[in-house]
Image (cartoon, rainbow, N blue to C red):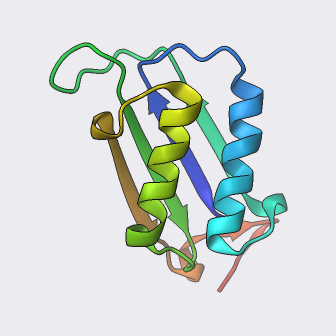
Amino acid sequence: MPYINISTSAKIEDKKKILDEISMLVSSLTNKSKRFVMAKLEADSEMYFEDESPCCFIEIKSIGSLNPSQMSGQISNFIYEKMGIPIDKIYISFEDVPASMWAWNGRTFG
């Protein structure tokens, strides 16, 4: 139930590897099983952030376990190291979703 959605204008060669690695990172940062982490990667998107150089927008949603001030640096560094996108070209949006508003396996968590 952590969900990470990555949109970037960069071209990514090995999307499956990035998805696996970011899932492990989010699992570690939220202390939730990787089994429940859903990750999405949209690469080579038309995006603009000050200019046409590569940029990235990340959405992270979870039922609790979010610590934006602690997580943002590690996630930004991951994106920079794996995709080459400068940290000042990355926005991250965090959303703590109530358990009653998140469903899996046919029912809500709360």
Instruction: Tell me the quarter of the picture where residue 50 sits.
Output: top left
Quadrant, the N terminus: bottom right
Quadrant, the C terminus: bottom right
The residue at the point 18 percent across, 17 percent down is 51
Viewer-proximal residue among 12 and 60: 12
Vertical placement of residue 84 versus 18, above or below: above
List x then y, in percent, for residue 28.
70, 66
Q: Say left or right for 55 vs 31.
A: left
Check the image and name the residue furthest to the bottom: 110
Viewer-proximal residue among 20 and 105: 20
Viewer-proximal residue among 27 and 100: 27
List x then y, in percent, for residue 75.
51, 51
Image mark count: 0
List x then y, in percent, for residue 35.
84, 60
List x then y, in percent, for residue 10.
46, 18
Vertical placement of residue 31 versus 22, above or below: below
The residue at the point 57 percent across, 78 percent down is 65
Q: Say left or right for 34 vs 31.
A: right
The residue at the point 41 percent across, 68 percent down is 68
Q: Say left or right for 82 vs 51.
A: right
The residue at the point 44 percent across, 44 percent down is 58
Vertical placement of residue 10 versus 38, above or below: above
